[in-house]
Amino acid sequence: MHNGTLLAAVDLGSNSFRLEIGRFEHGHIQRVEYIKETVRQGNGLDDNRNLTPDALQRGWDCLARFAERLADFPSAQVRAVATQTLREARNRDVFLHRANQILGHPIDVVSGPEEARLIYQGVSHMLAQSNERRLVVDIGGRSTELILGQQFNANAVASFRVGSVAWSARYFPQGVFTAQAFNTAEIAAKAVLDEALDAYRPEDWEVAYGSSGTIGAVGDMLAAAGHPPGTITPEGLDWLQERMLRAQSADRLRLEGLKEERRPVIGGGLSVLRAVFELLQIDRMQVAQGALRQGALYDLLDREQPTTDLRTSTVRSLMQRFAVDEAQAERVAQVACALFAQASHGDHAHALRKLGWAARLHEIGCRISHSESHRHGAYILDNTDVAGFSQPELHRLGMLVLGHKGKVRKLETDLDDATFALQLLCLRLAVVLCHARRDPDTHALALHANTGLGTFELSVSAGWAERYPQSAHLLREEVLAWQKTPWTLALDIQ
């Protein structure tokens, strides 16, 4: 990453969408521009957990405005992340299909633990470095994240389905504030957050930090009223609740530091924050400057190099957890990546890295069932929360794992993507060539791709088929497997 490079992060939160643009300078990212729009998609989920037409349109309209600013950004310099509302929405694919087109960059729906990790990265990079043990709390529109960390390392992450938008709609309808409503909302929040007690004990951290929306708003109101700037205490929360009860409703609440877009959700946010303070025995919280969007920016830097890409170590962890044959996994990965590099004729570093991950995980399902390992492997990747990966990325890896053996046409909808088709072919060829679980002789092989015509050709030098008759037979079977798909595989055995 060169000094002066512009990076952008888009945070599709439940209450607000945010665009952060920063300039990379000597290992740090300096803010260049920040845009925030109150979209309130979290309020747009109906009883069936579908985003309403209005909520869909509000999101698309906002992204269209962001897209104009991002028009000249290369894809490698933009990270767009969606959180709890789109994790919940049953029709999220409807939103994402059009949203990706409008924004011009892929939107990653991240899991709750991954959201928490990114939040911690954002907070930690904006703090002075020390060895203090930190608790970081982020109360969003529909989820609350808790993280324990030290320096840049998040050691424990958790996400809970409780937030300012959801709690305001449920316990403060029409924005009415009563003592009973606050009490009920706080008890309900504690019931959700209760499982955090064992993992987030007071002795496990030294300093508590609060990130983003609700906590930032509370900090602003307390500071404007004369409380210590950047600090939240139980006494401050009691004072704020008393002022809200006096006002009786959000519309009548007049407090300096309260922004208009925060007014409709401040009741739910405060009740969740009070629950967190009491459960975790917090007596003082510092308002942090960093948040999810800064974490996404720094994650772009880490993803740039294989040595710093957290996803590589995550793949290794999954291999160990599911007792993958590491020698075979590495063998298949090396062959698959060599074939892809030979046939792709360009700079496809990210696609190559993802192919390597899929190859190393292609036998992840064998511990459950050997004959159906590809299906179990895909299921595991679709239903696991691991550090560094978004849900669409894990699904993509799962589709490669699902397709590494058996019929190709079961993935026909994915085969419209030429890069995916080439990745899949290279993985399948590597599995064939490594069938004997020893290093294959690939020097006599050459793979060519013409994605415009939808054709692949594998050339085999004279004498190779006679030396490896079983491999040659399996390659001929692979030619048949690609029939009835949009792609043609030709085998030229000299």
Image (cartoon, rainbow, N blue to C red):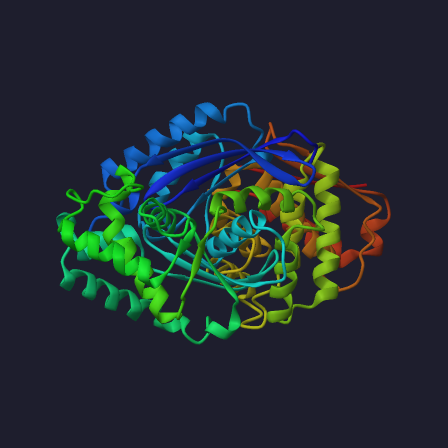
Q: Is residue 115 left or right of residue 298?
A: left
Residue 244, position in %: x, y?
20, 52
Q: Is residue 444 left or right of residue 236?
A: right
* Count of marks, rendered view: 0
Residue 205, position in %: x, y?
52, 68
Instruction: Identify whether 22 is placed above or below 185.
Output: above
Q: In this view, does 171 lie to the left or right of 427?
A: left
* Extreme residue toward the bottom, this view: 198
Q: Can residue 384 be seen in this view?
A: no
Q: Can residue 430 be seen in this view?
A: yes
Residue at left offset 71%, top offset 37%: 343
Question: Residue 234 occupies which quadrant of the picture?
Answer: bottom left
Residue at left offset 33%, top offset 44%: 224
Residue 31, position in %: x, y?
54, 34
Q: In this view, does 53 lie to the left or right of 127?
A: left
* Extreme residue toward the front, this view: 226
Residue 454, position in %: x, y?
59, 33
Question: Residue 312 occupies which quadrant of the picture?
Answer: bottom right
Instruction: Identify whether 234 is placed above or below 98.
Output: below
Residue at left offset 75%, top offset 52%: 334
